[in-house]
Image (tube, rainbow, N blue to C red):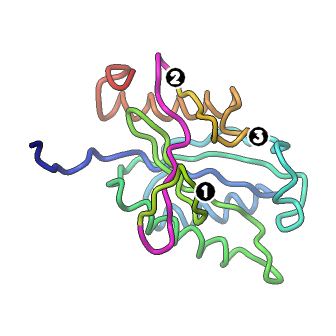
């Protein structure tokens, strides 16, 4: 019988969708207050994978990713998702979201995203929040699953997430020595 042990700390990431850089900047002010200094910001990317968010958020939409210097314990992701939902509400106008905030974390072997939506490949955490393994680390890079969202399958997103994962491993582990 193996013994339960404390999980390794992981790197918090946040993906944001919005029409304006001002909304990204405003959200980042909340994040810094709640999660500490940002250590990585991706370039702003056009988001044209779906029109699902346009009615609520407007268009054209942009995506960016950030990560944080301070590591978190994986079980904190549910409370972080609740907090980012409240930030979405604070930044809303006329009872409509203006920004979509997707928290998750990168470990040596995977990208986890937090969501409020249940499905067969998602595990319930608590407070109405589920965790999805969105990407797996194999042979030097992240790889998608059949359920991975199309944007998270893109070379551009995977390149950004590989960079964040490599930063994490260089600072807190042995680069490339884990998971595949």
Where is residue 16? Give x, y as percent.
Answer: 67, 54
Distance from the alpha carbon under mark 2 to that under mark 3: 20 Å
Q: Earlier in the sequence, mark 1 or mark 2?
A: 1
x and y, in percent, of residue 73 in the image? 32, 54
The mark found on residue 81 in the picture is: none
Q: What residue is at 52 percent from the left and 71 percent from the top?
A: 82
| Nearer-the-camera pick, 41 or 173 | 173
Q: Residue at x 52, y 50 (%)?
A: 132
Asked if disc 1 and disc 2 are in contact, CB closer than 8 Å, the reply is no
- Front residue of 34/142: it is 142
Secondary structure state at the residue bearing disc 3? strand
Q: Tag 3 or tag 2, which sits nearer the N-term?
A: 3
* Circle nearer the N terminus (1, 3): 3
Q: In the image, is 24 to the left or to the right of 70? A: right
Percent coordinates x, y for residue 177 in the rendering: 32, 20
Query: Residues under labels 1 and 2: Cα distance?
Result: 21 Å
Q: Quadrant of the N terminus?
A: top left
Do the numbered discs 1 and 3 sit on residues whose CB atoms are within 8 Å?
A: no
Numbered label attached to residue 45: 3
Which residue is under mark 1? 102
Residues in magenta? Answer: 126-140
Question: Is 144 placed above or below 24 here?
Answer: above
- Residue at horizontal 57%, vertical 62%? 118
Q: Is residue 35 above or below residue 66?
A: below
Nearer mark to the viewer, of 1 and 3: 1
Q: Quadrant of the C terminus?
A: top left
- Is label 1 in a helix, a strand or a loop? strand
Residue that lies at the very extreme toward the top in this rendered image:
139
Badge 1 crowding class, 10 Å Cα cut-off, few under 14, some 14 to 19, many 20 or more, is some
According to the image, label 2 marks what residue? Answer: 141
């Amino acid at each position: 019988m193996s013994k339960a042990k404390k999980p390794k700390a992981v790197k918090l990431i946040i993906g944001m969708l919005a029409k304006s850089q001002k909304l990204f900047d405003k959200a980042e002010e909340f994040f810094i207050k709640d999660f500490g200094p940002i250590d990585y910001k991706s370039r702003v990317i056009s988001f044209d994978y779906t029109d699902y968010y346009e009615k609520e958020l407007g268009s054209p939409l942009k995506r960016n990713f950030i990560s944080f210097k301070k590591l978190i314990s994986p079980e904190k992701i549910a409370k972080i998702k609740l907090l980012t939902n409240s930030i979405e509400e604070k930044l809303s106008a006329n009872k409509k979201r203006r920004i979509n905030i997707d928290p998750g974390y990168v470990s040596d072997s995977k990208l986890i995203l937090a969501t409020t939506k249940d499905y067969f490949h998602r595990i319930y955490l608590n407070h109405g929040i589920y965790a999805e393994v969105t990407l797996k680390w194999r042979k030097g890079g992240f790889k998608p699953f059949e359920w991975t969202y199309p944007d998270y399958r893109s070379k551009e997103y995977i390149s950004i997430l590989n960079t964040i994962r490599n930063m994490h491993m260089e600072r807190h582990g042995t680069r490339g020595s884990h998971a595949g």
